[in-house]
Amino acid sequence: MNDKMTPIVKCAVTAVCMALCVVLPMALHAIPNAGTLLSPMHLPVLLCGLICGWQYGLLCGLAGPMLSCFITSMPGIGYLPTMMLELAIYGFVTGLMMRLIHTGKQLADIYISLLTAMLAGRIVTGIARALIFAAGSYSWKAWATGYFVSSFPGIVLQLILVPALYLALQKAHVIPARRRSREFA
């Protein structure tokens, strides 16, 4: 997380990321099954958590899919609760990890944060589906297929684009450079 950014700037970045949660799925709608394959909403939520911190990442993860659903019907209302849960965890964990992890290597911090968030979101959402949303009809095979096999292109895309965008925004001085010291406040 970057404490050099004012809350107003963080709100603006979060709003842009929430708007991207609406626009990216629409832009990819022409590609068959692009939502499952590329997971376009994941990109802005993960980026928001990295840039603005856990509070804003959490908000983006909750509000982004809800806005998209109400504006474009993507995701469908039946899938909306699990999508909101997954993306909220992504934004929250990514921001929290960026606050807690300080290896001295910015790229390592970014990847540790991303991978932890991506795994946590998939595990928690899988458990929620098995116990609440699809109780009794959700299997390990469905979880592994849905969250790892079918979405593998999206996972690769996230692991390439999110760090590249974060570093490019930093290099362009759109977002401040990350502090190298430990910060737990």
Image (cartoon, grey):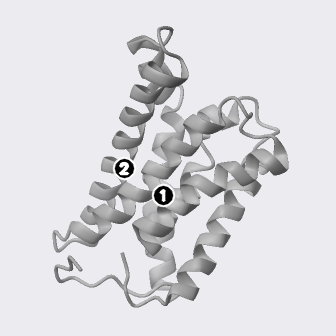
- Where, by quadrant of the figure, is residue 64 drawn? bottom right
* Residue ID for mark 2: 117
Please tell me whether residue 75 is drawn above or below residue 117 in the rendered image: above
* Residue ID for mark 1: 46
Q: What's under tag 1, amino acid-wise?
A: Leu
Residue at 16 percent across and 79 percent down: it is 182
SS under mark 1? helix
Q: 123 or 181, which lies in front?
A: 123
Asked if residue 129 can be seen in this view, the reply is: yes
SS under mark 2? helix
Image position, residue 11 (x, y; %) = 59, 78
Side of 172 where 95 appears, left or right: left
Q: What's under tag 2, amino acid-wise?
A: Ala
Side of 75 where 43 appears, left or right: left
Pointer 2 or 1: first along the chain:
1
Residue at 31 percent across and 57 percent down: it is 113
Asked if residue 164 can be seen in this view, the reply is: no
Alpha carbons under labels 2 and 1: distance apart: 8 Å
Image position, residue 60 (x, y; %) = 57, 61
Image position, residue 90 (x, y; %) = 44, 51
Residue at 38 percent across and 81 percent down: it is 2
Q: Are marks 2 and 1 in contact (CB under 8 Å)?
A: yes
Please tell me whether residue 185 is drawn above or below residue 33 in the rendered image: below
Please tell me whether residue 54 is drawn above or below residue 90 in the rendered image: below
